[in-house]
Amino acid sequence: MRFILHIFIFLALVNSSSAFAQNQKDKVEALRVDYITKRVELSSAESEKFWPIYNEYNDKIKAIRKNLRQSYRKGPENLSDQESEQLYILFVQSKQAEVDVHKQYNDKLKVIIGARKMVKLHLAEEEFRMKVMRSLNPKGEGE
């Protein structure tokens, strides 16, 4: 009986930490949307068209990167020469796929918000990324 109680407590802790992590991701995502919307100066009409396409774009980039990360799980020291060569080819193909997705979606977004706001978008993305990185490393360690 005590063993079952320990398992229940463990599962409750795992579930709560998972919910906390998801809540944190949701908060960061909301902050990112707000930051980009303000910095790019998206109108309501632009936002309505922009965000679904931008989110689709981000999902595709994340999927490409996740696939590559999963391929690296074995660790380079445990790979044969042939496996290393295949992983290197996958790396190059993944980077090309990212470029292709960037081009495709940047063209779609430019139609919605124009070139000037596309430049603002790229700057806002980088600024937001840097703000998040600084918030994770407030003392500037490792920079």
Image (cartoon, helix red, strand yellow):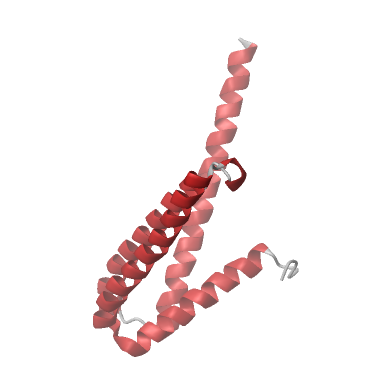
> Where on the picture, by quarter, is residue 93?
bottom left
Classify the position of the N terminus by image quarter: top right
- Residue at point 42% right, 84% down? 120
Question: In screen coordinates, is 102 left or right of 70?
Answer: left
- Farthest residue in the front direction? 81
> Can residue 73 be seen?
no
Q: Which sits in the foreground, 118 or 138?
A: 118
The count of marks equals 0
Estimate the x, y position of residue 77 in percent, counting from the top left: 62, 44
Question: In screen coordinates, is 16 left or right of 139?
Answer: left
> Can residue 91 be seen?
yes
Estimate the x, y position of residue 44 in percent, counting from the top left: 29, 78
Classify the position of the C terminus by image quarter: bottom right
- Residue at point 51% right, 49% down? 84
- Farthest residue in the top direction? 1
Question: In screen coordinates, is 138 left or right of 46?
Answer: right
Estimate the x, y position of residue 31 in percent, counting from the top left: 49, 67
- Residue at point 42% right, 54% down? 90
Q: Which sits in the foreground, 36 or 59?
A: 59
- Residue at point 50% right, 59% down? 27
> Where on the picture, by quarter, is residue 135?
bottom right
Q: Which sits in the foreground, 10 or 119?
A: 119
Estimate the x, y position of residue 128 in percent, counting from the top left: 52, 73
